[in-house]
Image: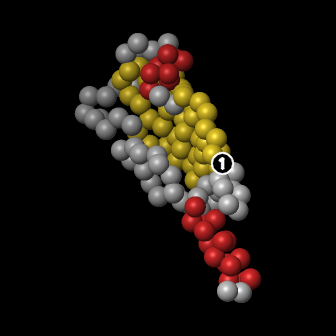
Amino acid sequence: MTTARVVLIIACLFAVAGCANSLRAPVRPPGGLLFTNYQAPLTTNFSETSRGAKVGTGEAMYLRIPLIFVNPDLAWGDASIQTAARNGGITTVQYADYEYLTVLGIFSKVTVRVHGD
């Protein structure tokens, strides 16, 4: 196999590796290869949903360091609804949404926002 062919295969693997992530939510638009930033609801019952007077947030970040043979992953933070409610002083959560940001499939950040009283 020629050197150019090996380099092309490795470049393709790096390009596709950023597309695979494990975020699951009710609404998830397709992501881009270079940059993705979107907001979506976590609450799907909108018939009687009010937002409340307070807002709390929780964040989690993820960093993948692309190396040739290994990809060390680092993750930190807490983007749970419970933590976001505690950070906003909310005792009754009425609505929740999230924001997802990823750059080159290397850095990702999830911010969960809860609204309530």
Residue lying at the far left of the rendered structure? 47
User: Residue at coordinates 40% horizontally, 43% vertically from top-left?
Assistant: 25
Residue 81 picture location, percent across and down: 44, 26
Q: Residues within 10 Å of mark 1 (few under 14, many from 20)?
A: few
Residue lying at the far right of the rendered structure? 3
Q: Which residue is mark 1?
A: 72
Badge 1 element: loop
Q: Is residue 37 left or right of residue 22?
A: right
Name the image quarter holding residue 7.
bottom right
Residue 31 position (above or below residue 45): below
User: Residue at coordinates 39% horizontally, 37% vertically from top-left?
Assistant: 42
Asked if one can make out residue 47 in the rendered structure from this viewpoint, the answer is yes
Residue 32 position (above or below residue 99): below
Residue 62 picture location, percent across and down: 61, 42
- The front one of 109 and 52 is 109
Residue 50 picture location, percent across and down: 35, 25
User: Residue at coordinates 35% horizontally, 35% vertically from top-left?
Assistant: 43
Total numbered labels: 1
User: Residue at coordinates 26% horizontally, 28% vertically from top-left?
Assistant: 48
Q: Amino acid at mark 1?
A: Pro
Q: Quadrant of the N terminus?
A: bottom right
Residue 61 position (above or below residue 93): below
- The front one of 37 and 70 is 70
